[in-house]
Image: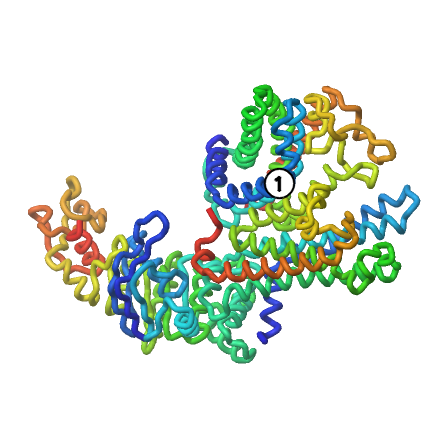
Amino acid sequence: MRPLLLWRYEVRRAGWAAVLAPPLVAAIVVLLAVVDAADGADQRGTVIRNLFAALEMGLPLVAGIGAASLVGRDPAAELQLTVPTPYRATLLRRLAVVVGWTALVALLIAAVLLVIDGWADRPQAHGAVVGQLVWLAPTLWLAAVGFLAGAVFRGPAAAGGLVAVLWMIEQILTEAVQQHQWSRLLYLFATSQGTVPADWTGNRLTLVATAIVLGIAAWLLLGGTERLVRGEAG
Amino acid sequence: MIPTARYELRMMLRKRSMWISMAIIVGLLSLTAFRQISDAVRDNDARGVMTTVALLVNIFLPVGYGSLLADRLVRDQLLGVAPILDATGGSALARLFGKYLGVCAAAAVPLATVYFGFAVVYTVVSGRPAGLAWALAAFAVVLLPAVLFVGAFALAVPLIMPASLFRVLFVGYWFWGNAITPATMPTLANSLVSPIGGYPLSALLGYRDTVSAGPTPGASLNFLRPQPTPATAWLSIAVLFALAALALYAAHAIRARTTR
Amino acid sequence: MQIDITGLTKRYKGGVPALDRLDLVVPTGMFGLLGANGAGKTTLMRILAGLLRPTAGTVRIGGRDVTTRAGRLAIQRVLGYLPQDLGVYPDLTAREFLDYVALLKGIDDRSDRRRRVGELLEVVALTADADRRLRGYSGGMRRRVGIAQALLADPRLLIVDEPTAGLDPEERIRFRTLLAQLAGARTIVLSTHIVDDIAQTCRELAVLATGRLVFRGTVDELVRRAERHVWSVVTTGPAPTSGTIVSAVSHDDGMRYRVVSPAQPTPDAEPVPPNLEDGYLALAQTRS
């Protein structure tokens, strides 16, 4: 096990924006609920809906774009590629920081939901324990997509753009995505936007499984030092 | 100003990653909306098809090119060319504007490729040359204002925050400010300030498929949603340009402060 | 640690070879690599550091094959690399940056790391500024940080690519002296287009041009290439047209030119003893 100090340096690499992003996004989503409920009747329902939205939509987006930003903006990349610590291990450490911090914020929100008995409002999530898949599945999936896109494009701009558009497609073309079983299994927002109830668990597990596959693909791609020395694609 | 614009355009168009990512995005969109697209290509209503596709393109692609443009100004600082560029003749504002025009042109090129590419396919398959005319009109009053709006903010905002944070907030804003049904929560969607171009789409191009502009019963901020008329459509475009100009001016002010 | 290069070719996409069937043996000690921009020096440095894979040919460093993963890892454990463009993390202080790189190089023991970082900061004369953030460092100071990081794990192989670019004369001399003192049992490959750096520190060198080896020998041998080829011309008239003008200095009695030319450039030109730069130019002339 490498020293903890190495992890601390990688946290510093992430920067203040990466630390700020998850709580900021969650706060904005919750604020929208508070503003919305100010003149409406169902305050509790609105807040719960938005907390789930933060969990399932907001935080995965943060993790995805964060993961997409890991490759291509490292000023010391050439040096990193010549030290005994493999650069892809360093990148994986940075990914763990991004996803880990997002997960911590997610768990906090999940705890809030537990306190206000919000999990009962989403019975398809099978309670607060299995219900952690609400955020974990899309977070891992978008992070894996972002990481792989980063490995392919070696640039945060293109990789981030791809994650962003994927997120939008799943937000807006809900009906199209729900039409076929295979796309339903890859639907990110099955809890908030709804899906065929029986498919929920399968959907969450499929997302986690594909995330692992995509992550492995990224790992293999990042083993090619020559690509990383060349820098941003094109 | 023009040389800066041309340079910026050339630099961005040369990036393979931009074309490849755009291709993947278009591929994903086509795959997801395959049935709708293949129906549309055979539809006789040229106006309806081109405006619907314009809306589709304007919902999704800005998120892609907004992300791509996010670090263009900051890159100058990173690559250390900022002092060299500053030392060349011409005012900083002119250079900023040149860069702005360049990146907007760079975003518009793949956008036009996709949109007019579809228009050509439609014209050939359906035999309706009016499709190209409607495409031109939609590009001018719907797609281009969005490019100019997004381009300004994509250049300016990353000056005060890391580009990755901008990307997250921008995607969230784009969804909230354009795609959310106004009755569900306070939003700028369907308003004069919505860069997706709902007002020009409905009032200038006669788009009727979904409600994209105008007041919604039960929604807040309806004062920003006058009835869609040609006048309010042009007002909407003007509002977007004004906001873009404001963003550019802010960028200029920030850079002037940080240049030693 | 000897470096054995046989038939080394590196071709990038587009076809033009950056390195073309290079055969070279680099012995232990200080070794210079000279060549114009685009000659292939950086490509060679990167292959030696394990960053790039050869298209053809073999490279063995201390008996290990650089093209295998195990070989690369073994070499990287004893490698100190200073790239041409060393990027640093601007938010870290010099001390923190070196600490971080030391961790990446596998120096996990905290006190060991602290000691080494402190020693190296002394060596590159950065102790006073060690706790300032790197974003406030000048180019020369960053170079020194680069040199310090290359020395962190007590490397047996040092690859330094254009190390004195951007350094002022005093810093350049200090750096050269430091490198020369380190040579001993180490192998140091110094790649540069600044001839004087090699003249002052290396006994042997190689010259690359468009990816090919055009000279391999001692510094003295390359200097001798310019014997009877270097002239001093003083004139108030036009500059000599034959040969290569190395320098032109204005004096009271006219312009004094130093010219490298196989034949006497003007009737009143006087032969002068050659230096390494003259030898390099004479070599270039025989090739063209």
| Mark 1 element type | helix
- Rendered view: C273 above or below B29: below
Residue at which label 1 appears:
B29
- Which of B104 and B246 lies nearest the eye of the viewer? B104
Name which residue type carries label 1: Leu
Q: Is residue C246 above or below residue A76?
A: above
Q: Residues within 10 Å of mark 1 (few under 14, many from 20)?
A: many
Please tell me which residue lies in front, A115 or C227: A115
| Residue A7 seen in render | yes
**Residue depicted at 50% across the width and 58% down the height:** A221
Task: Indicate the position of residue B150 as horizontal and vertical percent values.
Answer: 63, 37
Give the left or right position of residue A51, taking residue C272 as reference. right
**Figure disc tally:** 1
User: How far across and how far down the image is residue C138, in percent?
Assistant: 47, 57
Q: Residue at x 17, y 52 (%)?
A: C287
Q: Residue furthest left?
A: C267
* Chain to which the residue tagged by mark 1 belongs: B
Residue B145: x, y in percent?
Answer: 63, 30
Residue B211 position by quadrant = top right
Residue C281 vertical position relative to residue C128 in the rendered view, above or below:
above
Q: Is residue A28 above or below residue C57?
A: above
Residue at x 67%, y 32% (from the top left corner): B55
Position of residue C212 in the picture relative to residue A166 (left or right)? left
State how the image is colored: rainbow
Q: Position of B161 compared to C113: left or right?
A: right
> x%, y% of residue C136?
53, 58
Report the quarter where the N terminus of chain C lies. bottom left
* Residue B145 seen by the camera: no
